[in-house]
Image (cartoon, rainbow, N blue to C red):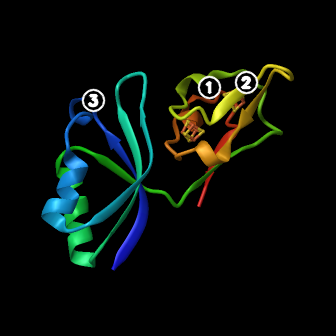
Amino acid sequence: MINKKIVLKFPPSLVDQPIICKLVKDFDLEFNILKAYVTPDEEGLLVIELKGKDKNYNEGIEYLKSKGIIIQTLKQRIMKNDEKCVHCGVCISVCPTKALLMDIDTMKVEFIEDDCIACEHCILACPVGAMEATF
Ligand code: SF4
Ligand code: SF4
């Protein structure tokens, strides 16, 4: 039995298709949607817990990949290095889940780790390398 939390990145063409339902019907998997987002450029991001027999799980994952869905295991943790951050706000605009927010009282960028789905958009966007991934 496999039980994992994974992040699925859907291209815009697949966002409104019932792909996850097929995991239940065709691969006998159980899923629990933990978070779901659509980014400004219409990419879909879904954090799910997926559970089932090893063979079914692996076949289900291969099915998702064959559809063009990018799969990432939710085992990495994103951290904000406050020593490096200059609070420029660039990361706020690329974060799909609003895990990075400007505190208007302090004018400092806050990181809400519970809302982060480890998509790494902020790591690519940050000009000073203040957002880091750890495993
Ligand atoms: S982009 Fe980098 S430096 Fe700018 S607010 Fe975000 S973490 Fe801080
Ligand atoms: S990795 Fe960065 S951009 Fe992605 S959800 Fe987490 S804080 Fe937001």
Looking at the image, tell me whether mark 1 or mark 2 is earlier in sequence order: 1
Residue to which mark 3 is pinned: 12
Q: Which mark is residue 116?
A: none
Residue 14, given in percent of the width and then of the height, sits at 22, 36
Residue 1, given in percent of the width and then of the height, sits at 33, 80
What is the spatial separation of the Cα atoms under label 3 and label 1, in whole angstroms? 21 Å
Residue 62 visible in the displayed image? no
Looking at the image, tell me whether mark 2 or mark 3 is earlier in sequence order: 3
Residue to which mark 1 is pinned: 92
Ligand 1 lies under 8 Å from the Cβ of mark 1:
yes
- Residue type of the residue flagged with mark 3: Pro
What is the spatial separation of the Cα atoms under label 1 and label 2, in whole angstroms? 8 Å
What is the spatial separation of the Cα atoms under label 2 and label 3, in whole angstroms? 28 Å
Confirm or deny contact between disc 3 and disc 1 (CB under 8 A).
no
Q: What kind of element bears circle 2?
A: strand
Q: Can you say whether 29 is above or below 98 in the image?
A: below
Q: Quadrant of the C terminus?
A: bottom right
Residue sitting at 57 percent across and 29 percent down? Answer: 125
Residue to which mark 2 is pinned: 102
Q: Quick check: 69 left or right of 107?
A: left
Q: Quick check: 128 left or right of 31?
A: right
- Disc 1 crowd rating (10 Å Cα; few below 14, some 14-19, many 20+) is many
Confirm or deny contact between disc 1 and disc 2 (CB under 8 A).
yes
In this rendered view, identify the residue nearer to me: 110 or 35.
35
Residue sitting at 70 percent across and 31 percent down? Answer: 128
- Residue type of the residue flagged with mark 2: Met
Q: What kind of element bears circle 3?
A: helix
